[in-house]
Image (cartoon, helix red, strand yellow):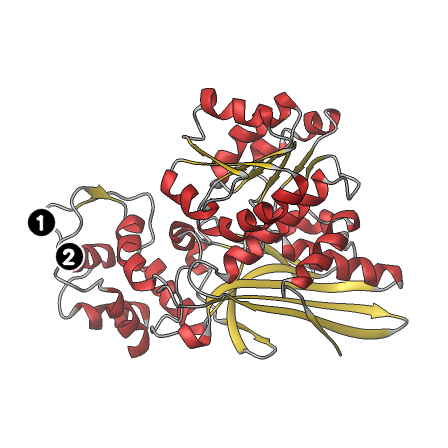
Amino acid sequence: MQTILIAGAGKSSIYLIDYILSYAPKNKWRVIVADSDAELIKAKVGKSLYAEAAAIDITDRAKREPLVKQADIVISLMPPNLHIHLAKDCLKHKKNLITSSYISEEMKAMDKEVKEAGLMFMCEMGLDPGIDHMTANKIIHGIHRVAGIITSFKSYCGGLIAPESDNNPWHYKFSWNPRNVVTAGAAGARYLLKGKEEDVPYEKMFEAIRKVTVPGLGALAYYPNRDSLGYLDAYEVPDVKTFMRATLRHPSFNKGWQALVALGLTDTSDSIDSHGNTYLSWVKSKAGWAKGAIEGFIAKKLNADDKVIQMLAWLGIFDQKPLPAGTHSSADILLGLLIPRWEMAHEDKDMVVMLHEIEYEHRGNKIKLSSSMVVKGENRDHSAMAKTVGLPIAILARMVLGNKLSLPKGVVIPNMPSVYRPVLTELAHYGIEFDDVVE
């Protein structure tokens, strides 16, 4: 009997756990789901005879390591900073590992030892990063096979609210970790544009309203995502002049979020004492307010139009209500306002959108290829985000346990044909597929 350890039973786990449990009877798998919240585990595994709950603190080595030791493969959906605990145990006990998160510096430093142990630590195996790597490299390798020369690569992805559930002025609701949304872009971004490296600081990340047209949806806004240049080698595009990975949002969202950033309301490093303070006094202090109506002051300070001011007011930042008791960062105060306002109702549907735009030269012709995907969720729990994050991981885990593919060794991402071909083929059966347009 093979044992699968799944660490994390949060928002993104429902499709992954359902998929693994659906194959458990046939394969006689034992599935251990570990999380600090016993109720979350119970909600995800139901009454499955093949599932076991492990309600533990994943940082507790004495409780975690025995679970890793008895597993045949480990899947981590934990927050990014917690993967390393599982990774160290996996290396010690020679277990393959799959995660959905970006490769951390700590994980990268383990690459040599992981290779020497003959193990696969597959990172970035979710949506973005994950499906983006697989589909982009499938296209890139196809162009290489016909001796095409890629000159421009742009990849966009966003977790959005579906049009039928879009009923707030921000055109956004939470379909994944709310805190990650608040801190998105905080480290700035780097990308290549027409042969020149561009560095965008956080303060200017949302300033320029850049737009791209997505087939069937129209114009969406985007902002550059993290350090795109770190993927140049993995994507093998030596002649590329433009190379950028970006996040999609509604144009109104970017305008409003830029205002929040400019006012310092997303600051994670400040410290606000709630005693005697309201949301309004907090905003006045952060904005450097002197006199007059705060809305007019901010409009003038930021050169913001009425729509942006209305979006800010809708969040409740101008309310005379007292701040939550205690000392908090501005980011935490803002998050407390956003969670109830951007929470998805049970019947709400989210939407995952991905678009690749690739320009290349072939036999003297300049060709532009657009490849797009739109996936809608069923409801808040069975969301498109959970589906597109969880299924790639689950499919790969099944294939590893069944010896269905040749495993890459080391700390890797899914950019190799041996992984992306079978995984993308199966994802298409679940409606996760792309439409290509060539110009």
Q: Nearer the viewer, residue 110 or 295?
A: 110
**Front residue of 113 and 379:** 379
Numbered mark located on residue 276 in the image: 1
Q: Residues within 10 Å of mark 1 (few under 14, many from 20)?
A: few
Q: Amino acid at mark 1?
A: Gly
Residue 217 visible somewhere in the drawing? yes
Side (left or right) of 220 relative to 95: left
Spatial CA distance of label 1 from label 2 is 9 Å
**Label 2 environment density (alpha carbons within 10 Å; few <14, some 14–19, many ≥20):** many
Q: Residue at x 24, y 43 (%)?
A: 271
Residue 302 in percent (x, y) is at 32, 68
Disc 2, SS: helix
Amino acid type indicated by mark 2:
Ser
Q: Where, by quadrant of the figure, is residue 313 drawn?
A: bottom left
Secondary element under disc 1, as helix, strand or loop, is loop
- As drawn, the residue found furthest toward the left would be 276
Q: Looking at the image, which residue is at 48% across and 66% down?
A: 378
Image position of 94 (left or right of 321):
right
Whether residue 88 appears in this view of the structure is no
The picture quadrant where one finds residue 319 is: bottom left
Q: Is residue 381 above or below residue 72?
A: below
Q: Quadrant of the N terminus?
A: top right
Q: CB of mark 1 within 8 Å of CB of mark 2? A: yes
| 34 or 247: nearer the viewer | 34
Where is the C terminus found, in terms of image quarters? Answer: bottom right
What residue is shown with label 2? Answer: 281
Whichever of labels 1 and 2 marks the residue nearer the N terminus, that label is 1
